[in-house]
Image: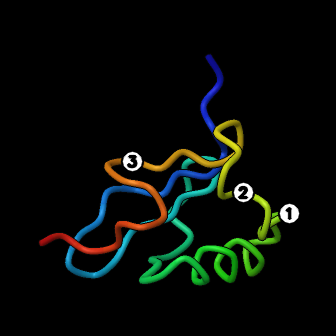
Amino acid sequence: MQRAPVIVHPPCSGGRRVTLHGQDIGRARRPGDIAAILRRAGFPAADLIWDDAGICEWREGGPDIWFTR
């Protein structure tokens, strides 16, 4: 099974770490941050990743979970 190129890592006190092909490209504090981070990294279709498991893997919660409690 091929791994998704975009990984949104588990939430922590500072938001969620975002990696692209294994490279750390930023930390998101809300959904819109992910698209901005991906655009800066040159990732095409940055706004179309939310529901495509082949492109984006959400770890320990989806786009509605951002910080640890």
Q: Mark 1 = which residue?
A: 45
Residue 49 image point, x, y percent: 72, 57
Residue at image coords 28%, 81%: 14
The answer to whether the residue labelled 1 contacts the one labelled 3, judged by CB atoms less than 8 Å apart, is: no
- Residue 34: image location, x then y, percent: 60, 74
Quadrant for the C terminus in the image: bottom left
Question: Which quadrant of the view contains residue 37?
Answer: bottom right
Please tell me how crowded label 3 is: few (under 14), some (14-19), or many (20+) other residues with Cα within 10 Å: few
Quadrant into which the N terminus falls = top right
Q: Secondary structure at mark 2?
A: loop
Residue visible at 47% across and 78% down?
A: 28
Q: CA distance from mark 1 to mark 3?
A: 20 Å
- Picture coordinates of residue 7 (x, y %)? 53, 51
Residue matched to label 3: 59
CA gap, disc 3 and disc 2: 14 Å
Nearest to N terminus: mark 3 or mark 2: 2
Work out whether mark 1 precedes mark 3 in sequence or the reverse, and give the earlier one: 1
Amino acid type, callout 2: Ile
Residue 60 at x, y percent in the picture: 31, 49
Q: Residue at x 62, y 52 (%)?
A: 6
The colour style of the image is rainbow
User: Which disc is residue 49 wearing?
Assistant: 2
Q: Looking at numbered disc 1 in the image, what kind of residue is underneath it?
A: Ala
- Above or below, comparing residue 8 to residue 27 in the picture: above
Asked whether the residues under the numbered discs 2 and 1 touch, taking CB atoms below 8 Å apart as contact, a structural biologist would say yes
Residue 45 relative to residue 35: left or right? right
Which residue of the protein is positioned furthest toward the front in this rendering?
Answer: 64
Q: Tell me which amino acid carries mark 3.
A: Arg
Is disc 1 surrounded by few (<14), some (14 to 19) or many (20+) residues within 10 Å? few
Instruction: Describe the element under mark 3 as helix, strand or loop.
Output: loop
State the image quarter where residue 43 is shown.
Answer: bottom right
